[in-house]
Amino acid sequence: MKQLQIIEEKPKLKDLIKITRESGIPLLGLIHIGIIDRGSSLLQVRASTACNMRCTFCSTAANSYEMHPYNYEIELDYLMDWIKEVIKLKNNEVNQINIDSVGEPTAYQKITELIKECKKIPGIEIITMQSNGTLLTKEKIKAMEEAGLNRINLSVHSLISEQAKELFGNENYNLEKIKEICNIINDSKIELNLTPVYLTGVNDHQIEKLIEFAKEINCKISIQKYEVYKYSRKDKRVKEQNWFKFYRKLEELEKKHNYKLKLGPIDFKIKKSKRVPLILSRGDVAIVEIIMPGWMKNEMISKSNNRAITIVDCNNKIGDKVRVKILETRDSIYIAKKV
Ligand code: SF4
């Protein structure tokens, strides 16, 4: 395989696909890696897919090897080229970058350099990052602060050590360390936003404890709704709630704890903005070239007009040309099937 560098890892780890500039793989079009434009002034940047946890309710089913046979990682310089290109395609209507991932963003080796480079881009005012906090240290937080990171959205779901370990699916999860990390972030220029997932019937009581914790250390808290997707990891104990009930619950908790819980785009200075123009529409048929294995089993990734397109139910080889029909183009994420 010429275009890609696939590193064979030890049996427990997944194969790692390193996406380099030489590969020419477009970094726009995929859900799991690259850049996502959802028509707002915030760009989502996904530099790698690896995660060190295995949460019982993970929406991306991170570390389910049978579902995701590969991990992906993008070379920093190449990622920066694409971030700048996407900003141009959006008429420079981007004021912030959120470094997130289908895994854990801080598992990306060059995370601090990524923050630093993003902050240098003219017009970028805010850099935010999702994290489970487990790979952060005092030194790393200091380096990220100096690099210009403005906010960390930190996922923490329980303040009971045993329950936290169980929900994160990792015996080594250290709640005391996470609390310490929260205090270190709070004492820095980086804003802390706690992002617990509300798992009805499992951590209800802990959500209230987390609100009190946020109040005590004076940080933001954005409670996340538990969502079940076709391919997410499901926690069967959780009673799913609809959006109406979820918001009603937030209102109730807001009153009870006298703390702001309903945070929206205005609170995070996110505006609507021009979308990257589509290169193909739903229903279009095109000849595309296979460029790398897909994130899900039985998927391959192809390219056309400098966009990456996922082909479902496909086992063709890299370099093959195939005829596909476009099924989805939402948020410039292209899904196709062979015809
Ligand atoms: S930390 Fe996030 S990405 Fe990793 S398993 Fe948990 S929910 Fe999934």
Image: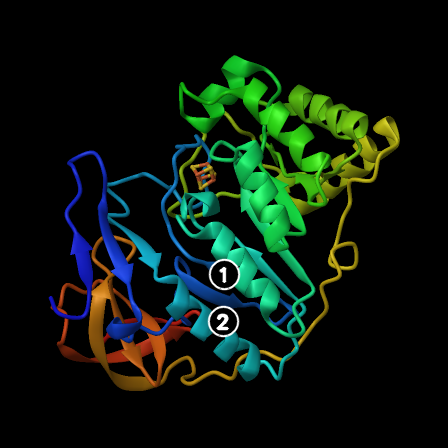
Q: Is residue 29 above or below residue 157?
A: below
Marks 1,2: beta carbons within 8 A = yes
Distance in Å between CA atoms under marks 1 and 2: 8 Å
Please rate how many residues cluster around mark 2, counting C-alpha atoms within 10 Å: few if below 14, some from 14 to 19, many from 20.
Answer: many
- Quadrant occupied by the C terminus: bottom left
User: Secondary structure under badge 2?
Assistant: helix
Can you tell me which quadrant of the image ligand 1 is in?
Answer: top left
Q: Does 22 appear above or below 179?
A: below
Amino acid under label 1? Val
Q: Is residue 255 left or right of residue 64?
A: right
User: Relative to 267, is 169 above or below?
Assistant: above
Q: Quadrant of the N terminus?
A: bottom left
Could you tell me which residue is drawn at 52 percent across and 17 percent down? 163
Q: Quadrant of residue 40?
A: bottom right
Identify the residue shown where x is 67% and y is 38%: 223
- Viewer-nearest residue: 148 or 292: 148
Q: Residues within 10 Å of mark 1 (few under 14, many from 20)?
A: many
Residue 140 visible, this orientation: yes
Locate residue 265, reporting x and y percent. Answer: 73, 58
Q: Which picture quadrant has residue 287?
A: bottom left
Left or right, 220 with respect to 323, comes to right
The amino acid at mark 2 is Ile
Could you tell me if residue 226 is visible in this image?
Answer: no
Q: Earlier in the sequence, mark 1 or mark 2?
A: 1
**Please, what secondary structure does the residue beneath circle 1 have?**
strand
Q: Which mark is residue 83?
A: 2
Which label was assigned to residue 45? 1
Image-based side of 225 in relation to 219, left or right: left
